[in-house]
Structure formats: C-alpha cells, structure tokens
Image (cartoon, rainbow, N blue to C red):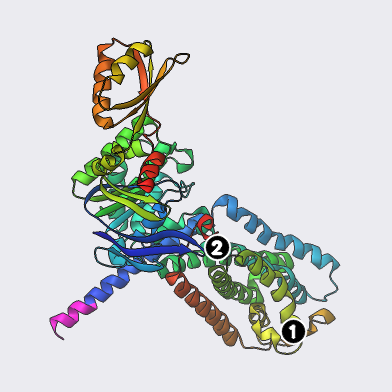
Amino acid sequence: MIEFINASRWYGQVIGLNDISCKIKPGLTALLGQNGAGKSTLLRLATGQLRPTTGQVLMFGEAPFANQNVLKRIGYCPEIDNFYENNSAREFVQFLAEISGLGRQKAKERTTEVLHSVGIIGYEDKKIAGYSKGMRQRVKLAQAMILDPDVILLDEPLNGLDPVSRREYIDLLHNLALGGKTIVVSSHILYEVESMTKSIVLLHRGRLLAEGDLRVIRGLIDKYPHRVRIVAGKPRELAAKLVSMSNVISVSIDKVLSTINLEVKEPDQFYDLLGRLTLEGEFDIHGYSSPDNNLESVFEYLVGA
Amino acid sequence: MDTARLTTIWNRYLNTWWVLKMLFAVYRQSLKEFTRFMKFSPWIILAVLGALLAVFFRSVSAATNASDQFTVIVIFYTFRIGTLAAAILATNILNAEVEQKTIVYLLTRPIPRWTLLLGRYLACFTAVSIVSVVAVISTGLGVFGTGAFHHHVVWLDCLAAIFGSLAYCGFFLLMSVLSNRSLIINLLVAFGWEITVPSLPGTAYLFSILTYMLGIHLGNKNTNLSLAAFSNLVTNHNFSIVTCLAVLAGVAAVCAGIATVVFSVSEFIPKEQAA
C-alpha cells in the first residue's frame, strides 16, 4: 500500500531521508524516531508534498506527488498546529471537504459526521482560535477523515494531549485500523507507541534503523543489560532477594535515597517478578523506573548493535 | 454518435463541472479571507480618502477644470491605491498560506493544483477591484460631486481599475510564486517602476501596467492638461481603449498562467527545513 524503494530526500546540503526501503501494510503502524530523524519528511513524501531526490515512493502503486488519484485515498494530519483561526471547526472541515470534490450538501453532511466521530460535539461552530490543544488535534483528524480514505497519516498526533484525550485518541485510531484502514502515526515517544501498536518503523538520522514487530526489536535490545531503579522502604532486604535471581546482573544500594540500582537481563521476566513483589508488599516498594525505557536508549542499543 | 464517444463527452463535462465547483469553493473561502473586516477596512478607508483629497485638491489646484483635476488625482492617488492593494494582497495569495503553513491542508487535497491558485487569484482580484473601484468613485464624487456618475471618464476609470487590478494581481502573483522575497519586489515595482516608468521618454513606458490604465482613462482623446509634469505621461498614452484592455487582460492571463504552471510543479518546504 505504501512503499519506499531506496528513497532519499535532500534539503540542499542536508539529508532528510537516506536510502529508505520499506513497505507499510494495512493496520496501525508507528513511525518512531527522535526529532530530526526524518519522520515528517517520510510522511511528506508519502502524501505527495515532496518528491524523493532519488529512489521511489509509491502509494497504491503510483507516485503521490500532486497525484489526485492518490490524494483521493489518503488523509493527512500534519504536525503543525495552524488553521484558519477565524473559521469554526465546521467551516474549516467543510471547506476542505468541498475542495476535495464533495458537493456542498454532501460536504455539510460529511462534516457533521466526522466532527461527531472525532468527538467534537457542541463546539463545532465556535472559532478554532478558542480551541484547546486536544480539540485542535481532533479537528486535524476530522479533516484527514473527510473522504473516508484508505490511508491516514498522522504526524505526532498525540503531542500536547492530556492522558485522557490521549487514550481516547488512540482508541479512535484503533477503531479506524480495525475497520481495515492503514494508519501511520509518527511519534518520538516510545511508551506512547508501545501502547498503540506493535508494528513500528524506526528511523534514526534519516536512516531506517528497524522495521517490523516491536517485540522482535525489543528482543534485540533485551540482549543487553537493562538498568532498573527501584525505590523501596526496605532496600537492603529487597536487594538481598533480588541478588539471588538469575536474571539480575548487578545490584547497588543508595541508602540515603532508599533506592536500588540494578542491571538485569530479560527485562520482561524481571518486571513480571517485580510486579508480584510489589503486590505482596513485603519490601514496601514505592515505585520503579528504568532510564533505558526511552527511545534514546533504544537507539543507543540499536546503533551500537 | 456511438455510446463510447457520448460517455467520453459526458465524463469530460462532469469533470469540468467538478473542477469548477472546487474552484468556486476555493474562491469563496479566499474571498472571505481577503475581505475580512480587520484586513479589508483599512483599504476601503484609503480608497474613500480619495474623496477628501479631491475636495482639498480642488481648492488648491492649478489645473483649470474639474476634468483635469480628476486626471491629476487619478494618476497620483486613485490608481496607486489599487496598485498598492494588489502588491500586498496578491503577495498573500500564496505567502499567507505558506507562512501560516496551512498550505499543507490544500496541497494534500485531491484537487488540481492550478485550481487552488486560480481560485485564490480570482478572490484577490475581486478584493482589489472593490478597493480600486471604490477609490475611483470616491475621487469622482470628490471632484464632480453627485454628478460624478454622469461623467464618462468615471466609468472608464472604473473599467481601468478593474482591468488594472486583474493585471497587477496576475503580475504580483507571479512574483510571489517565483520568489520568496516577493513582498519587497512587489513593493519596489508598485512604488518604483510603476511611478517612474510611465513618464519616461522612449519606449520603456510600454512595460508599465499603469500606462494602459491611463490609456483607458484618457480614452484616446487629447487632453488639455497643461501641467508640465504630465507632458510625458499624457503623450505616452495614445492607445485605443480596446488595445489597453487587451494588453491588461493579456498580462493577467500570461502571468497567472505561468504562476499556476510553476505552482503545480513546485514543492513547498517549511522554512526550518529549507534552511
């Protein structure tokens, strides 16, 4: 459905995307990468705003640049937070519906339908200038959905959303994916992506670093020691218990802060056990975190690997 | 006629109708934007000021009759308002969308790109025409009083203002498509080129839009305007009205045509990435 064949894109002397080859199939796929990794460039190439400098980008087998046949079948939700601020959500979406080829009456009906489906009810006739971040994200999604496209590409759609809105937004995307659509969501936050999908495309400095099932990529990462920090009321007792476990490589205690710093193998198994220990309450575990559970460390592992 | 041929003709008709509907949608939205009260009212105020200027000029002018006074104000104020409005508004046909980054919503629609630009161009032309015509009528009312509408020259100047707006918007649109410093270029053209070139000796005046607007204003008639400063301006505009209208429409068509072609094949990269 979406295919990149050795696609590169240069901005003058700067490379935005470097020799990318991948295929994105129906379902929900996350495009993961730090800022400047090339996520937005990839989406701009897929939506026909840019042409690849070398290689090919194909959407439904055709080059998407200014291609009406392709643009009819895709919806794009850009990262920018800009609108025609003096318009209401209804006016904005209806205008885009009309220039997408829907007749005025049809555009009106479809606008009401999509605004309701993204949860903008009761505010659709107020000016966008007064909308919260969450509502603005929903308006962007609504305009992307207006033609009921086969592919929806969303550039950092969860930016600035509160946890409740984020959950609702992710549910909405899941429902669209379950309806057979291809949804591509870009993000630079790993945990955000993990809660959304297992299918990822990982970009780093314009290059494709990994593609496929997140669990497989995680498996690659898990070969390396994983750092965990635990805050507990009884750190010494907990450390004694942990050190006897086979997947714990090293343990150090910070008595002042009541924290234990660990290096572990097979983190999934370790977290299962830690969860059980927390529930049992014997060691008064207040919380735990891992400095390795962020995208940066994933990159460090993968680039180093 | 066989069925296949009929079907082809019918599909072509449907496609044309579909494109026209989209063009109209772009035009309507853009016109709303160009004529938004806060943006548009200063232009209307400037246009109406022509009446006050005319009343003032009548009391201090060396020109002997109302017709000459009207010509002087039209050359030095009224037509300039239209030029300035065109320079600024036509620059915004594309730049406003690019700078606000809202162009991304337009470029990802299944619409021929030329309709996006043409719709916005026509909306800009409508807005500039309104300003220019209001300026002409205000000046006419200021010079001739309520009898302005009985003066042939006022109607001719309305025509000149409309065709001039068409040509100016087309030219300034082309500049904005070709250059990302178009506002500076357009203002230089409006205040530099268009002020000096029409009164230059030789044939340089042929390359000014104002030349043909003045050609319509003078209506191929000799004028008794005696101010020395106008000697070149007046002798340089010995064209028929039809020629002037054709040239202005031609300039508009060529400029808008090139602009739409360039726009159709161009990429619009956000500034931060282009840098």
Task: Indicate the quadrant where residue A286 lies.
Answer: top left
In the displayed structure, does residue A274 sit left or right of residue B29? left
The circle drawn on residue B123 is: none
Sort mark 2 into few (<14), some (14-19) or many (20+) by Cα contacts within 10 Å: many
Secondary element at tag 2: helix
Give the overall secondary structure of the magenta segment.
helix
Chain letter of the residue beneath label 1 in the structure image:
B
- Mark 1 to mark 2 CA distance (whole Å): 29 Å
Q: Residue A46 versus residue B1: which sits nearer the camera?
A: A46
For disc 1, the marked residue is: B234
The image shows residue A134 at horizontal and vertical percentages of 40, 37
Quadrant of res B68: bottom right
Would residue B2 be visible to someone looking at this image?
yes
Task: Describe residue B51's horizontal placement relative to residue B155 as left or right.
Answer: right
* Image x and y of residue A217, in percent: 28, 44
The vertical placement of B104 against B178, above or below, is above
Q: Sequence order check: which comes first, mark 1 or mark 2?
A: 2
The kind of secondary structure element at disc 1 is helix
Rendered residue at 74%/87% (across/down): B235
* Badge 2 amino acid: Ala
> Which chain is home to disc 2?
B
Task: Give x and y (percent) for residue B32.
Answer: 49, 55
Q: Is residue B7 magenta?
A: yes
- In the rendered image, residue B225 lying in the magenta stretch gets the answer no
Q: Which residues are magenta?
A: B1-9
Amino acid type assigned to the residue bearing label 1 in the image:
Val
**Relative to B57, is B40 on the left or the right?**
left
Classify B180 as above or below A305. below
**Residue A215 or A77: which is nearer the viewer?**
A215
| Residue B123 placement (x, y as % from top left) | 49, 64
Which label was assigned to residue B127?
2
Residue drawn at x 74%, y 90% is B202
